[in-house]
Image: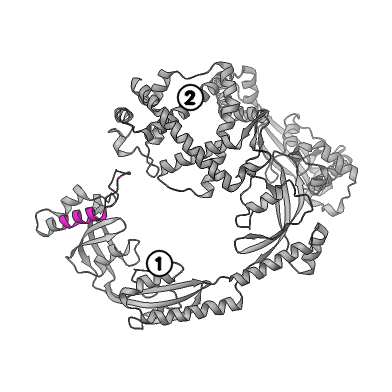
């Protein structure tokens, strides 16, 4: 404990320094973006408490910096940043909402308990920090002989931590402490769960009492909606009875929009082709030593292909040509995959169709040392020394594979991956050692993995011609002039048609395709079919944007769009006028149900199920082993009213019409098989208790979160 206490004391100053530095960084970013000059500077409210952007943004930046350190990255992509923002928000909800609960109950984690969770019986959060993400195993330097986290090595690390590690350890302690308190809280609730014997008996019967029924059903789909008329009163009545079906947790909005896809003009195509013709002429004059730098400088792909290709593996447009021509031949420009290209035959060789070799790898990233980088110079010296030992027969190749090779995939095989050909997925320099070399060659080859000492064990007798082809590509893209012309068209549309009615008229006049984006939330980062539509979403939710407003032109990737806001659905139960198109079909189904039930009642008098079905021209379906817990009917899905009616019937009886979700039913009860006698309900009790307990971990938090009346405004800032 004295070691940890000392570490925590020393970490205080560093945390303060880092905190100030992060705050300066955040303030600078905020001033540049104008983020904090809005009237409302809260990212939301939790349990009536506003969450200031300053506080929240500071926490987000901390989490981002922690992630960068852990992943050894200097930047993170937008999707990861979005995830961090959401995780931070959830964490703040947890801290504000759950902390009140913990304090009321007096829950805490003592210093001794925390010490045990960190350094004696490490919590899973601690174990995760020392687990390799790819292999899922404890990293070699901290694993015991059984592959578990070695607490002795962990304690040794804690005693010699640097300041940066101390800060990370402090954050880890905080996370473990929070997890432990949450576990205690949930366990208290779980221990309060109790299943009575009566409840267990009822569940046992629900699972095991079986009913054999026959039934006839008239589906709502058998009568078209157009044949049923409903009044406004019918629609309103259905809506009032089922309002919760139209309740939503978040406000959503709907836009209709038109797109102007920006594509290259003929002038752009001609200009690109002309530029590539000049490049083709220049390419012819370049020497072998100049080819690679010229390709990298001129090609959009910025790549020089070192591969040697067999016939049939190049693009069909150049494959046969390149195998007929001499070195230095240039072909093009030619159009392929929306790019103009120029190809040059750099080299050709005769290579074995297959080869077999073994190797020893001296890696740039030493095995088991994720934070160590070996220089290329050092790796080359080591590889040359090993090759010399083998050539002078001072050491055997197979022994050195076991002792020094850092390619774990080939060590058990003596460094040998077996026979391979030019299509095998090895890097080119590695393959070329065997395919282009001679049997018995011992060479040192460089790849992106490090240096390989390679011995060619065998080569096939059959050989083929291989060619190396360099390609310069230029994507066909619209010029600034072309892009501006599309922008002018889009803005002209936006300026001319400024209402919903005018917008629709413009779509018709200009023969455009109108698209729809529905159920868009304020925090959405994506809209299907649109690239990076965040600015569109911001416009939709801007306080100045009203229903019926038409936007200016938005530039999204390779297109411009103009949108009109057609619908605003507030959080909670949607007004009838917004969901009428959903309610009306349901009201018609209800009307059909009433019509079918009235018709059935007339034909049921004194009839059995077979006679009734014959009158109604319906099929009689049979279902054995129906129980109270039956979730769905074959071909119909969930039908609770059917099940509820059936389990309350007597043998030999026939039901009144049952209005269900998909149709109207008449049920005949043929047989009831009682549940087997038992006096031991312990398994049922255990099952029910387990089910209830499993819900505690998420439903308690969800219930408290809902009661906290959370207002989420993050989308205004991120």
Label whose residue precedes the other's in the sequence (1 or 2) = 2
Is any part of residue 22 visible from this angle? yes
Quadrant in which the C terminus is drawn:
top right
The residue most toward the top is: 106
Left or right position of 469 against 206: left
Coordinates of residue 341 in the picture (x, y in percent): 46, 75
> Of residues 355 and 182, which is closer to you in this image?
182
Coordinates of residue 435 in the picture (x, y in percent): 26, 68
* Displayed quadrant of residue 9: top left
Question: Mark 1: few, some, or many residues within 10 Å (few <14, many ≥20)?
Answer: some
Which range is magenta?
Answer: 365-387
Coordinates of residue 526 in the picture (x, y in percent): 62, 51
* Displayed quadrant of residue 610: top right
Left or right position of 123 against 572: left
- Report if residue 371 lies within the magenta region: yes
> Of residues 557 and 211, which is closer to you in this image?
557
Name which residue lies at 37% across and 69% down. Answer: 305
- The mark found on residue 180 in the picture is 2
> Which residue carries the number 1 mark?
303
Is any part of residue 626 visible from this angle? no
> Of residues 669 and 657, which is closer to you in this image?
657
Q: Secondary structure at mark 1?
A: loop
Coordinates of residue 206 in the picture (x, y in percent): 65, 28
Question: Mark 2: few, some, or many residues within 10 Å (few <14, many ≥20)?
Answer: some
Q: Are marks 1 and 2 in contact (CB under 8 Å)?
A: no
> Of residues 258 and 663, which is closer to you in this image?
258
**448 to 125, vertically: above or below:** below
* Displayed quadrant of residue 265: bottom right
Left or right position of 295 against 197: left
């Amino acid at each position: 404990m004295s070691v940890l206490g000392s570490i925590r004391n020393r970490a205080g100053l560093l945390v303060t320094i880092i905190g100030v530095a992060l705050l300066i960084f955040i303030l600078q970013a905020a001033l540049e973006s104008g983020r904090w000059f809005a009237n409302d500077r809260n990212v939301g409210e939790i349990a009536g408490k506003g969450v200031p952007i300053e506080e929240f943004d500071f926490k987000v930046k901390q989490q981002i910096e922690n992630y960068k350190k852990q992943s050894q990255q200097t930047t993170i992509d937008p999707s990861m940043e979005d995830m961090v923002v959401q995780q931070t928000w959830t964490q703040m909800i947890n801290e504000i909402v759950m902390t009140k609960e913990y304090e009321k109950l007096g829950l805490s984690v003592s210093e001794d308990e925390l010490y045990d969770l960190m350094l004696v019986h490490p919590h899973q959060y601690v174990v995760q920090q020392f687990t390799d993400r790819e292999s899922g195993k404890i990293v070699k330097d901290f694993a015991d002989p059984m592959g578990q986290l070695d607490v002795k090595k962990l304690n040794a690390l804690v005693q010699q931590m640097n300041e940066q590690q101390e800060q990370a350890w402090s954050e880890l302690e905080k996370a473990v402490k929070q997890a432990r308190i949450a576990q205690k809280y949930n366990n208290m609730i779980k221990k309060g769960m109790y299943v009575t014997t009566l409840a267990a008996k009822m569940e046992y019967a629900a699972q095991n009492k079986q009913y054999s029924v026959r039934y006839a059903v008239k589906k709502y789909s058998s009568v078209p909606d157009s044949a049923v008329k409903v009044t406004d009163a019918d629609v309103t009545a259905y809506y009032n009875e089922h309002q919760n079906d139209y309740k939503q947790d978040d406000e959503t909005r709907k836009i209709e929009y038109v797109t102007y896809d920006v594509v290259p003009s003929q002038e752009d195509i001609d200009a690109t082709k002309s530029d590539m013709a000049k490049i083709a002429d220049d390419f012819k004059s370049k020497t072998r030593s100049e080819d690679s730098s010229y390709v990298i400088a001129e090609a959009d792909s910025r790549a020089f292909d070192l591969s040697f290709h067999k016939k049939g593996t190049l693009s069909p447009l150049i494959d046969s040509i390149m195998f007929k021509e001499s070195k230095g031949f240039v072909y093009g420009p030619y159009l392929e995959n929306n790019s103009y290209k120029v190809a040059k035959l750099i080299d050709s060789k005769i290579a074995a169709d297959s080869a077999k070799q073994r190797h020893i790898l001296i890696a740039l990233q030493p095995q088991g040392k994720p934070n160590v980088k070996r220089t290329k110079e050092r790796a080359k010296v080591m590889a040359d020394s090993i090759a010399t030992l083998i050539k002078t027969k001072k050491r055997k190749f197979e022994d050195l594979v076991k002792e020094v090779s850092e390619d774990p995939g080939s060590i058990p095989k003596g460094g040998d991956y077996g026979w391979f050909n030019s299509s095998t997925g090895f890097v080119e320099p590695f393959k070329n050692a065997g395919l282009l070399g001679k049997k018995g060659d011992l060479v040192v080859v460089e790849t992106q993995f490090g240096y390989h000492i390679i011995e060619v064990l065998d080569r096939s007798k059959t050989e083929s011609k291989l060619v190396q082809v360099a390609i310069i590509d230029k994507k066909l893209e619209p010029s600034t002039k072309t892009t501006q012309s599309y922008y002018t068209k889009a803005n002209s549309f936006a300026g001319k048609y400024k209402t919903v009615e005018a917008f629709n008229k413009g779509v018709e006049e200009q023969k455009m395709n109108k698209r729809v984006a529905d159920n868009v939330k304020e925090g959405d980062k994506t809209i299907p079919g649109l690239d990076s539509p965040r600015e569109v979403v911001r416009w939709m939710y801007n306080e100045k944007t009203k229903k019926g407003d038409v936007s200016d032109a938005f530039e999204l990737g390779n297109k411009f769009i103009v949108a009109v806001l057609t619908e605003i659905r507030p959080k909670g139960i949607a007004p009838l006028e917004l969901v009428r198109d959903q309610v009306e079909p349901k009201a018609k189904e209800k009307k059909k149900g009433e019509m079918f039930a009235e018709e059935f009642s007339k034909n049921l008098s004194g009839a059995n199920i077979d006679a009734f079905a014959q009158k109604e021209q319906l099929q009689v379906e049979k279902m054995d082993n129906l129980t109270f817990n039956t979730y769905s009917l074959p071909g119909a899905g969930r039908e609770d009213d059917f099940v509820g009616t059936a389990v309350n019937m007597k043998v030999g009886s026939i039901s009144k019409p049952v209005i269900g979700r998909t149709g109207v039913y008449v049920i005949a009860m043929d047989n009831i098989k009682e549940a087997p006698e038992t006096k031991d309900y312990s398994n049922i009790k255990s099952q029910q208790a387990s089910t209830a307990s499993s819900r505690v971990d998420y439903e308690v938090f969800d219930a408290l979160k809902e009661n906290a009346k959370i207002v989420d405004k993050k989308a205004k800032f991120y």
